[in-house]
Every structure is written in C-alpha cells, then in structure tokens.
Amino acid sequence: MNTENNASPTDLPAADAQASESGAQAPAHVAHPKTIKSYVKRAGRTTTGQAKAFEDLGPKFLLQYAPQPLEPQAAFGRAGRLILEIGFGMGEATAHIARVRPDDNFLCCEVHEPGVGALLKRIGEQEIANIRILQHDAVEVIDQMLTEGCLDGIHIFFPDPWHKKKHNKRRLIQSPLIAKLVGRLKVGGYLHCATDWQPYAEQMLEVLSAEPRLANSALDAGLQGYAPKPDYRPLTKFENRGLRLGHGVWDLVFHRVAA
C-alpha cells in the first residue's frame, strides 16, 4: 500500500481524532472543528537537509494561506495552466510531473512538514521553478483561495484508503468535496485520481460518475471506467513495490463538462 500521500477527510476532524490517539496537536493555523479535512496528522521528523530547504527555498516556493482569492500569475510570476495537487506526500511524483510539464503551474497542498521539506529539497536539487506549496488544509484553500473556474486540472494520488469499513467515511473522495473541486475546474479541465486499493477505486468511480458536471474519459476505452496511467504520472517507489507484490493500481481521469 502506498503510504506516500496522506489526504483524508472525516466528519470528526481527522487531526483531532489522531491527536486523541497519539497526543499530537493540530497545527495552530488550521481551524477546527471542521466537517471535512484533507489530511490526517502523521508522525515524522524533518531532516537537516529538509530544514535547510525550508530556510533557503521556503521564502520563494511556500505560499502563505490567506482567506482571500489567490492570484496565480502573481504567485508563480507568470501565466500558465493551474494544476492543484492535494496531498503530495514526499513529493516524488510532484517533482517529476512538474519537470515533464514545465509550461504548467502546480499549486500543491500538504500539511506534513517532512513532506513539504522533501519537496522543497527536490525543487532545489532539480531546479524546478513551476511549483508553489501551501502547507495548509486543502479544503480551506479550496473554499477561501480558489475562485470558480480557476483550475485547469486537479491531482489526487494515493490518498489514505482508510481500509476499515467503519473508517470509510474519512476517505477524501466523497461527493461534497468533489462538488467543491468541480466548481473550481474550468470547462474542459480534468480531475485525475489514483489509488492502489481496489475498494477505494470502486468508491472513487461511483462518486465521480455521480457528479453530473464530470465525464469519464475512459468510458469509450473498454476499461470498465478506469483510465490507462497517463504518461506524466510516474511509478513511485511505493507503487513499484506494490506492483511487485501483485497489487493493482487504478487511475481515474474525468473532465469537466458544461452543466
């Protein structure tokens, strides 16, 4: 199971639920309680290299959360298609995609500090210029910073599958959040999800198919609604390990259509 990404909502705040088990506290800048959260807090230690990346590269590549509309051209210093990524984990796939799609701008949400530090480190090592990071709950970013029709694409790769049935309600891909996201997509824009947990893939397919403003790009491909892996999405080390163990991976690519 790919544990690189950590996005997940809950109707009881995920950060609070985790805190009750581990003693961890939600970030001071994250308001709670909240109906949906895009993450659950995870343990982890920031390395020396990641801390240095925060110091050296944070001022340029970290954006501050503010409850006001984002101005993408000002944030990136240029025009370009805007792609939102929710929960990038340690940033391996994010960095790869940004390199192979240099004309697009990638707005990436992640609250896990070692993951943010790891992506900043990759940005420096690989000289990537088209990523900006918001270390904040993606749901609040969507609600407060993203305007209707501002996005050209959305990536949600390997969110926490919450395997136990009693925890399924904490999964990120559910109708209320998808409705929010679709409202931020331009007509013709795309939503790309991926998971290595078949029951979650089936839920994703059901939820996305039920949204009337989305059309499944794979319906005509004879693939039971699941899309071939787009060339831009790399196989991460977690995914390669799963494939070696015989695990499946499911990609879903839907496009925004006029309602």
Image (spheres, grey):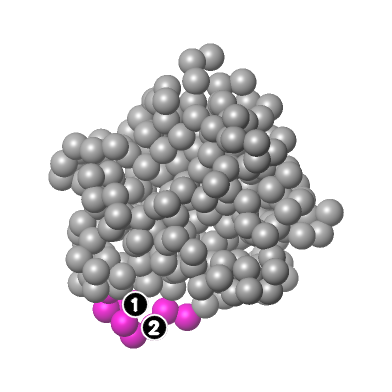
Residue at left offset 77%, top offset 60%: 163
Taking 35 as reference, is 175 above or below it?
A: above
Q: Is residue 139 magenta?
A: no
Using the rendered image of the protein, determine whether residue 178 is visible from the camera's viewpoint. Answer: no
Q: Which segment is the magenta one? A: 45-53
- Label disc, if present, on residue 50 of the rendered structure: 1
The spot of residue 225 in percent (x, y) is: 65, 37
- Extreme front residue here? 222
Q: Where is residue 104, by image quadrant?
A: top left
Q: Main secondary structure of the magenta part?
A: helix
Instruction: From the viewer's perspective, tell me whether residue 197 is left or right of residue 91.
Output: right
* Residue bearing the label numbered 2: 47
Helix, strand or loop for disc 2: loop
- Label disc, if present, on residue 188 of the rendered structure: none
Helix, strand or loop for disc 1: helix
- Extreme left residue here? 77
Residue at left offset 19%, top offset 37%: 79
Which amino acid lies under the numbered mark 2 shown in the image of this protein? Thr
Taking 202 as reference, is 1 above or below it?
A: below
